């Protein structure tokens, strides 16, 4: 997220899903605009945010605003330019015998593949002030075969970081 240079960024989570990255970013001090296009998943996330708030995380959840709809449209309509845009497109189906976690299996069944990840990356790059962070499977090619400025590797996933020149 670039927290060393910008400790309290405005983060736009373009693919909020069940809210894992949005809550983590908010817990680290970011203000988060979370976007989810699936009405069912947005409802689940809204419920989860309410439960987290009631369970003592009100200070964190207060920094998360949820929008339901197409992230490209919501991103272009924001009055304030986000510092960071997070993009976590649905991972493709695994060819391995080991299955994805249950929550990911549920999301894959509900949502299917993300066929517009390239367009979402374009919109994010045009709107983010400092950077776009894209979560990918460890061995998958970058979205749109664009070479990132930096990559943070993990065992199962990596984060491709695209700097947008804002500092």
Image: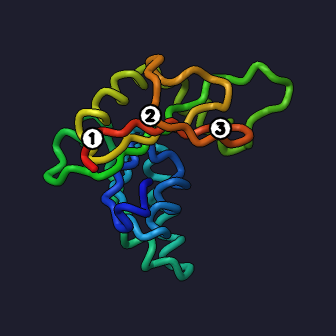
Q: Earlier in the sequence, mark 2 or mark 3?
A: 2
Q: Secondary structure at mark 3?
A: strand
x and y percent of residue 141 in the render? 57, 20
Q: Secondary structure at mark 2?
A: loop
- Badge number at residue 149: 2
Is residue 68 something that shows in the picture?
yes
**For residue 11, which quarter of the picture?**
bottom left
Report the colour scheme: rainbow
List the residue tagged with mark 3. 157
Q: Are marks 3 and 1 in contact (CB under 8 Å)?
A: no
Q: Secondary structure at mark 1?
A: loop
Q: Earlier in the sequence, mark 2 or mark 1?
A: 2
- Badge number at residue 165: 1
Image position of 56 (left or right of 140): left
Instruction: Looking at the picture, tell me which residue is in the foreground, 97 or 37.
Output: 97
Give the Cα separation between the discs numbered 2 and 1.
Answer: 11 Å
- For marks 2 and 3, give the one nearer the viewer: 2
**In this picture, is 132 found above or below 18?**
above
**In this picture, is 86 found above or below 30?**
above
Report crowding for label 3: few under 14, some 14 to 19, many 20 or more residues within 10 A (C-alpha): some
Give the Cα separation between the discs numbered 3 and 1.
Answer: 25 Å
Give the Cα separation between the discs numbered 2 and 3.
Answer: 17 Å
Report crowding for label 2: few under 14, some 14 to 19, many 20 or more residues within 10 A (C-alpha): few
Task: Please report the residue visible at 42 percent of the width from the left and 55 percent of the height from the top.
Answer: 2
């Amino acid at each position: 997220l670039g927290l060393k240079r910008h400790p309290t960024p405005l983060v736009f989570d373009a693919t909020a899903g069940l809210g894992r990255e949005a809550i983590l970013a908010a817990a680290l001090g970011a203000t988060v605009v979370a976007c989810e296009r699936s009405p069912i998943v947005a409802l689940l996330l809204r419920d989860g945010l309410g439960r987290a708030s009631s369970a003592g995380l009100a200070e964190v959840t207060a920094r998360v605003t949820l929008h339901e709809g197409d992230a490209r449209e919501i991103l272009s309509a924001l009055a304030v330019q986000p510092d960071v845009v997070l993009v976590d497109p649905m991972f493709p189906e695994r060819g391995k015998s080991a299955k994805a976690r249950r929550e990911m299996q549920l999301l894959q069944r509900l949502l299917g593949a993300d066929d517009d990840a390239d367009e979402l990356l374009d919109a994010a790059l045009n709107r983010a002030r400092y950077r776009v962070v894209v979560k990918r499977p460890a061995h998958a090619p970058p979205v749109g075969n664009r070479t990132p400025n930096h990559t943070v590797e993990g065992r199962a996933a990596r984060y491709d970081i695209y700097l947008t020149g804002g500092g």
